[in-house]
Amino acid sequence: MHSVKRPECPCVFTSEFFRELVAYLGADPSPIRPWWGWRKLAKQYPGLRRDIEQYIETATTGDPAGAAVDMMLYFGSSRGWAEKVIENAKTGYPASAAAELAWFHGSSLAWAEEIAARMRQRCV
């Protein structure tokens, strides 16, 4: 059981959010500095990868799809895992995340277009 309140997943991932997340996951957030991004977080806390993946998979706020791409890039999460998170994201910018995976990381363009089509339907 976590003794710290679960932080809301944001759209913009700041060092303050990383501190809250690390504390929620039971690790010491004191090394996190104001300029930290995903790269530094992954270098300092590689053992939190699975816990952060679970957190992102269950996020209902912010941009979990964008976070999934960053987890793939910096923590070494699998592209398949990131695709699943993007497909299931109910908030944030899944179409942008899908496009990034298709353009730069080997995901299918047809898959990314399907995600974009679903997002357009949400807006109608």
Image: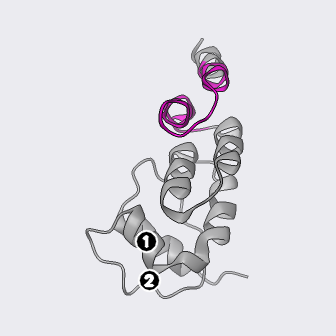
Q: Is-magenta flag for residue 81?
A: no
- Name the residue tied to disc 1: 41
Q: Are marks 2 and 1 in contact (CB under 8 Å)?
A: no
Q: Residue at x 40, y 65 (%)?
A: 39
Q: Nearer the viewer, residue 75 or 119?
A: 75
The disc at residue 10 is: none
Q: Secondary structure at mark 1?
A: helix
* Mark 1 residue crowding within 10 angstroms, few (<14) / some (14–19) / many (20+): many
As shown in the figure, which amino acid type bears the numbered disc 2? Pro
As shown in the figure, which amino acid type bears the numbered disc 1? Leu
- Name the residue tied to disc 2: 29
Residue ranking furthest to the front? 106
Residue 92, percent from left and from top: 52, 38
Residue 9, percent from left and from top: 53, 55
Q: Which residues are magenta?
A: 91-116
* Residue 119 lies in quadrant: top right
* Residue 41 lies in quadrant: bottom left
Q: Residue at x 60, y 79 (%)?
A: 47
Q: Secondary structure at mark 2?
A: loop
Task: Judge whether 43 appears above or below 116 on screen.
Answer: below
Residue 84, percent from left and from top: 72, 43
Tell me if residue 103 can be seen: yes
Task: Judge whether 88 appears above or below 72 on screen.
Answer: above
Which is in the foreground here, disc 2 or disc 1?
1
- Name the quadrant of the C terminus: top right
Q: Residue at x 61, y 26 (%)?
A: 112
Task: Judge whether 44 appears above or below 72 on screen.
Answer: below
Q: Is-magenta flag for residue 96?
A: yes
